[in-house]
Amino acid sequence: MYIHKTSCISAQNTFSDIDLETINQSENNVLKVREPKYEGIPAGILRRMGKAVRIGVGSALPLISSERKPDGIVIGTANGGMEDCIKFLNQIVQYEEGTLTPTNFVQSTPNAIAGQIGLISANHGYNITHVHRGLAFENALLDVKMLLLENPNAEYLLGGLDEISDYNYNIEYLAGWYKKEAASNIDLYSSQTIGSIAGEGSAMFIVNNNPSDAQANIVDLTSLHSNNIEDVKTWFIAFLEKNNVTVEDIAVLISGENGDVRLHDYYALIENILKSNSSIVHYKHFSGEYPTTTAFALWLAIQTSNIDSLPTHFIKQKANTTNKNLCLLYNTYKGSQHSLILVNDIRK
Amino acid sequence: MHRVFVTGIGVISALGDNVASNHRALVSGDCGLSKAELVKTKYADLLHFGEVKVENETLIQRFSINDKGITRTSLLALQACNEAISDAALSQQQIASFDTALIVANTVGGMCLTDELFNDSNTKTEGSPFLASYDNGSVTLFLQQRYGIKGVCNTINTACSSSANAIMYGARLIQHGIVKRAIVGGADSLAKFTINGFNSLGILSSEFCRPFDETRNGLNLAEGAGFLILEAESDVKNKKVYAELTGYANTNDAYHASTLSPEGEGAYQAMTLALAKAILSPEKIGFINTHGTGTENNDLVESVALKRVFQTVPAFASSKSKIGHSLGASGGIEAVFSLLAMNHQEVYPSLHFESAIPETGLIPVLKTHSANISHVMCNSFGFGGNCSSLVFSKV
């Protein structure tokens, strides 16, 4: 499947004037999105939207042209509108189940994002929301892969997004997934403690089967549920074999390394299998950690066809990558969910 | 493309905690709706619910669960999932192979734990045991770990149509040869969150819900779980087969966040495309398990859409008139009910109906009777304009 258009709202300058050099810094261990002005969304509708719906719709609309509507909208989000969800919950508690306004409730359902995109773009096609925590975007990707086999001439809007609110920050903080000490995204990878920096963002793609003028080809993807590093190794090697790919073929590994010392072994495992053959790019200092960061990683993979043009802050290891065009995304969410996405940069 | 057969079913609803008890209640036209006894809410006595009268502790003991962080949604899911797996006689080796997928629909997750979630999301004190159990994915991950599933796992939330989409996703994984079998379905539990949410929209009835009745005034929220085992034809061999999943479609109404368009475009397209996928003309459908929530909007719009699709609307009923609306679970539970109707060649009544909606004049099945059913349709429509229809066919 071929990616044709991309759009991304993140904590960095990724939306209209893309600037990969400048790094916006985290505040209180959180990287919050830089929201654009949302010129395509009517003000009355925009006012009622929660942040997840805003960044989802806001990043999707630039990709939806008036000439060709996508044949379906396929979204991955672990949580959808957490802010609205807990706001509504707090109202229930505060007013002791009194008379409540439904806006927060309606905005909080994860499928409100795909629903709103469908509504604003008058799209009656396939419309789905995958919410499988750290593999929500991967399932959206697999869904589109199947859809393109079923409908070879179709075109789909694919997206992955999540928001960070004070509330889900609090839950994940208590569970030990964000750092307890004051930390900075700038030196995330040298951290020797547990937890990461929180983030949020939305990345959207137009995907079809047409190779001409495409930006990249998603060759294959796979996912795994396991805490066992041997399982991860076996699964990783099986994926390469299934795709007839050797470690020498991988030009770039885009690693989901997030500064959590508990996850270090998983990323080290993959890096060690690839050894010095591949360049290694990391990005969570730029995006922060959230369940659908692989959508951001895929967006980043497509931004540059040449690792030399990527700012050095992304680069962990640089290898001689001439004549190679395969890029591999590896991510683990909390060490129990793992994914691999193999991307062929066809612009080379 | 591989054909997809249903080889196992499991259900827990307000009518009972297994397939046999639900079937008995359907045949005798029982109503499972009642005041709430277990869920803690101000509305317990004021509204009617499709509550499962089994306490969490009973289920925790039944399954010997030691983990403190397991929610009611996960427990209901496990009950129905276990029944479906043993019905299909899946071996542990099959369940734990890379060839088995687990696709779970769910909208409430751990939000049934209002007080714990309130504290865990608002205060920086020590967390509760439920920190990893609030999201929708937690239900699937609980089942995944319990069964040791290694194949594709996914959680789907398209509001009230979630289960139908979970069934579709599992079927498509089989059709593409990605897996050989899929455990598919949905679960949701009653929660202060959804009770207050639907109440704030003014669509909960304080009486028994009256789907397709002229005087209907809202839905009754419910809980439960329904699961199916889907297997590739080539793998089924001599197994008992309930049906083939021949048709399915997912569309969007693209009209409003929480109401359906007057002409029911999303519903119309879902039914039409599901029939096209099954390569069936509308008159082949012997029975329709409608979405039929009992709200003014849904039942009128669904009736309008039914009349657009079918020249003569076939026998139809609302399962929600008996068990209420269990949101993300409803499509799974009602798929089980649809399969029971086809396998026993009978239709079950829609309850609390007196007079037809004047604009459409449709009258649901009013008492249990035998029927010739070769194909059954099951509708699920949800917030966000999400509409899905499934067609199961006799094998």
Image (spheres, coloured by chain):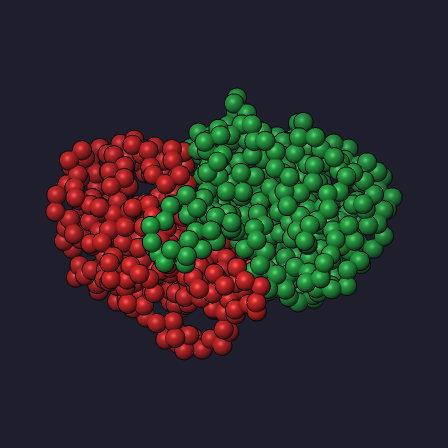
Chain B representation colour? red
Q: Residue at x 54, y 42 (%)?
A: A51
Q: Please give the name of the residue rendered at 56% of the width and 60% of the height, measured from the top-left corner.
A: A171
Left of A266 or right of it: where is A138?
A: left
Above or below, B333 against B159 in this view is below
Q: Is residue B15 visible?
A: yes
Q: Hey, which quadrant is residue B189 in on the image?
A: bottom left
**Depth order, front residue of A155/B134:** B134
Residue extending furthest front?
A95
Residue A51, relative to residue B153: is it above or below?
above
Q: Nearer the viewer, residue B139 or B237?
A: B139
Task: Name the tint of chain A in the rendering.
Answer: green
> Height in image: B146 above or below B174?
below
Q: Nearer the viewer, residue B46 or A21?
A: B46
User: Percent position (x, y) of residue B59?
Assistant: 39, 73
Q: Is residue A252 left or right of residue B129?
A: right
Nearer to the camera, B297 or A5 = B297
Residue A274 coordinates in the image, percent (x, y): 79, 54
Question: Residue sitting at 71 percent across and 55 percent down?
Answer: A258
Residue B140, position as x, y percentages in the image: 49, 60
